[in-house]
Image (tube, grey):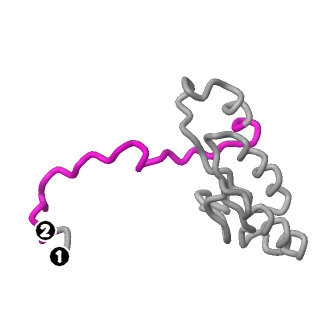
Amino acid sequence: STPSSSSTAGKKAASVPPLATPQLQPLTFERLREVLKSDTTTSGFEGCVAVGCTAKSLQKNLSFLDHDEVVGAFGIHPLNAAEWNEEVAQTLCTIMENPKVVAWGECGLDYFDKKR
Protein backbone atom coordinates (compact mmCIF):
# COMPACT_ATOMS: atom_id res chain seq x y z
CA SER A 1 0.00 0.00 0.00
CA THR A 2 1.10 3.58 -0.49
CA PRO A 3 2.13 5.68 2.50
CA SER A 4 -1.03 7.81 2.23
CA SER A 5 -3.30 4.77 2.43
CA SER A 6 -1.28 3.08 5.16
CA SER A 7 -2.75 2.67 8.62
CA THR A 8 0.18 4.76 9.89
CA ALA A 9 -0.65 7.74 7.67
CA GLY A 10 -0.96 10.90 9.69
CA LYS A 11 0.97 9.49 12.65
CA LYS A 12 4.27 10.98 13.71
CA ALA A 13 7.19 9.14 12.11
CA ALA A 14 9.56 7.29 14.42
CA SER A 15 12.80 9.13 15.09
CA VAL A 16 15.72 8.04 12.97
CA PRO A 17 18.89 7.05 14.82
CA PRO A 18 21.80 9.46 14.28
CA LEU A 19 23.92 6.89 12.43
CA ALA A 20 21.20 6.53 9.80
CA THR A 21 21.38 10.23 8.96
CA PRO A 22 25.06 11.11 8.47
CA GLN A 23 26.06 14.68 7.97
CA LEU A 24 27.73 15.24 4.61
CA GLN A 25 30.66 17.43 5.48
CA PRO A 26 33.39 17.45 2.86
CA LEU A 27 36.84 17.53 4.41
CA THR A 28 40.02 18.69 2.77
CA PHE A 29 43.01 16.36 3.08
CA GLU A 30 44.55 18.80 5.54
CA ARG A 31 41.41 19.00 7.71
CA LEU A 32 41.00 15.20 7.73
CA ARG A 33 44.62 14.77 8.82
CA GLU A 34 44.01 17.31 11.61
CA VAL A 35 40.84 15.52 12.78
CA LEU A 36 42.49 12.10 12.75
CA LYS A 37 45.46 13.38 14.76
CA SER A 38 43.09 14.67 17.46
CA ASP A 39 41.31 12.59 20.08
CA THR A 40 38.44 11.33 17.91
CA THR A 41 36.61 9.99 20.96
CA THR A 42 35.97 13.55 22.18
CA SER A 43 35.94 15.51 18.91
CA GLY A 44 32.52 14.32 17.74
CA PHE A 45 34.09 12.72 14.68
CA GLU A 46 32.46 9.32 14.11
CA GLY A 47 34.02 8.38 10.81
CA CYS A 48 34.06 9.07 7.12
CA VAL A 49 34.45 7.64 3.67
CA ALA A 50 37.65 8.73 1.94
CA VAL A 51 36.84 9.02 -1.75
CA GLY A 52 39.59 8.60 -4.31
CA CYS A 53 38.12 9.68 -7.63
CA THR A 54 41.15 10.92 -9.58
CA ALA A 55 44.31 9.05 -10.49
CA LYS A 56 46.32 11.47 -8.34
CA SER A 57 44.11 11.03 -5.25
CA LEU A 58 43.99 7.22 -5.12
CA GLN A 59 47.12 6.61 -3.02
CA LYS A 60 46.53 9.67 -0.83
CA ASN A 61 43.02 8.47 0.08
CA LEU A 62 44.23 4.91 0.55
CA SER A 63 46.59 6.14 3.27
CA PHE A 64 43.62 7.36 5.35
CA LEU A 65 42.33 3.78 5.65
CA ASP A 66 45.02 3.16 8.27
CA HIS A 67 42.66 4.89 10.72
CA ASP A 68 39.87 2.85 12.32
CA GLU A 69 37.24 5.51 11.63
CA VAL A 70 37.88 5.69 7.89
CA VAL A 71 36.67 3.45 5.06
CA GLY A 72 37.21 4.07 1.35
CA ALA A 73 35.50 4.38 -1.99
CA PHE A 74 37.60 4.38 -5.15
CA GLY A 75 37.17 4.85 -8.85
CA ILE A 76 37.60 7.45 -11.53
CA HIS A 77 34.92 10.12 -11.70
CA PRO A 78 33.51 10.74 -15.20
CA LEU A 79 34.92 14.27 -15.13
CA ASN A 80 38.36 12.62 -14.89
CA ALA A 81 37.79 9.85 -17.44
CA ALA A 82 40.76 11.02 -19.52
CA GLU A 83 43.04 9.82 -16.68
CA TRP A 84 42.01 6.18 -17.22
CA ASN A 85 44.82 3.90 -18.37
CA GLU A 86 46.20 0.43 -17.60
CA GLU A 87 48.26 1.70 -14.67
CA VAL A 88 45.17 3.26 -13.06
CA ALA A 89 43.22 0.05 -13.68
CA GLN A 90 45.94 -2.01 -11.99
CA THR A 91 46.14 0.42 -9.07
CA LEU A 92 42.38 0.16 -8.55
CA CYS A 93 42.51 -3.66 -8.69
CA THR A 94 45.18 -3.64 -5.98
CA ILE A 95 43.26 -1.14 -3.84
CA MET A 96 40.12 -3.30 -4.05
CA GLU A 97 41.94 -6.03 -2.11
CA ASN A 98 41.85 -3.82 0.99
CA PRO A 99 38.97 -4.96 3.25
CA LYS A 100 38.23 -1.35 4.25
CA VAL A 101 37.25 -0.44 0.70
CA VAL A 102 33.46 -0.37 0.80
CA ALA A 103 32.63 0.96 -2.66
CA TRP A 104 34.20 1.27 -6.07
CA GLY A 105 33.33 2.41 -9.54
CA GLU A 106 32.14 5.74 -10.80
CA CYS A 107 32.52 7.94 -7.75
CA GLY A 108 31.13 11.27 -6.82
CA LEU A 109 28.18 13.13 -5.41
CA ASP A 110 28.33 16.48 -7.12
CA TYR A 111 26.94 18.90 -4.55
CA PHE A 112 28.29 21.96 -6.27
CA ASP A 113 27.27 24.31 -9.03
CA LYS A 114 29.80 24.06 -11.86
CA LYS A 115 28.80 27.54 -13.04
CA ARG A 116 30.22 29.21 -9.92
The Cα–Cα distance between marks 2 and 1, rounded to whole angstroms, is: 6 Å
| Residue 28 part of the magenta segment | yes
The kind of residue tagged 1 is: Ser
Q: Going by the image, does 110 lie left or right of 52? A: left
Relative to 37, does residue 53 appear above or below in the rendering? below
| Residue 94 part of the magenta segment | no
Q: Residue at x 54, y 48 (%)?
A: 24
Depth check, front residue: 59 or 2: 59
Percent x, y for residue 55? 83, 63
Residue 95 in which image quadrant = bottom right
For marks 2 and 1 on the same chain, the one whose residue lies earlier in the sequence:
1
Residue 68 in which image quadrant = top right
Q: Residue at x 80, y 64 (%)?
A: 94
Percent x, y for residue 9? 13, 62
Q: Are marks 2 and 1 in contact (CB under 8 Å)?
A: yes
Percent x, y for residue 86? 89, 76
Quadrant (top left/top right/bottom left/bottom right) for the C terminus: bottom right
Q: Going by the image, does 20 lie left or right of 35? A: left
Neighbourhood count class around disc 1 (C-alpha, 10 Å): few under 14, some 14–19, many 20 upward: few
Q: Which residues are magenta?
A: 4-32
Q: Residue at x 67, y 71 (%)?
A: 106
Quadrant (top left/top right/bottom left/bottom right) for the N terminus: bottom left
The main secondary structure of the magenta stretch is: loop
The kind of residue tagged 2 is: Ser
Neighbourhood count class around disc 2 (C-alpha, 10 Å): few under 14, some 14–19, many 20 upward: few
Residue 92 in which image quadrant = bottom right
Q: Residue at x 13, y 68 (%)?
A: 6
Mark 1, secondary structure of its residue? loop
Mark 2, secondary structure of its residue? loop
Q: Which residue is mark 1?
A: 1
Q: Which residue is mark 2?
A: 6
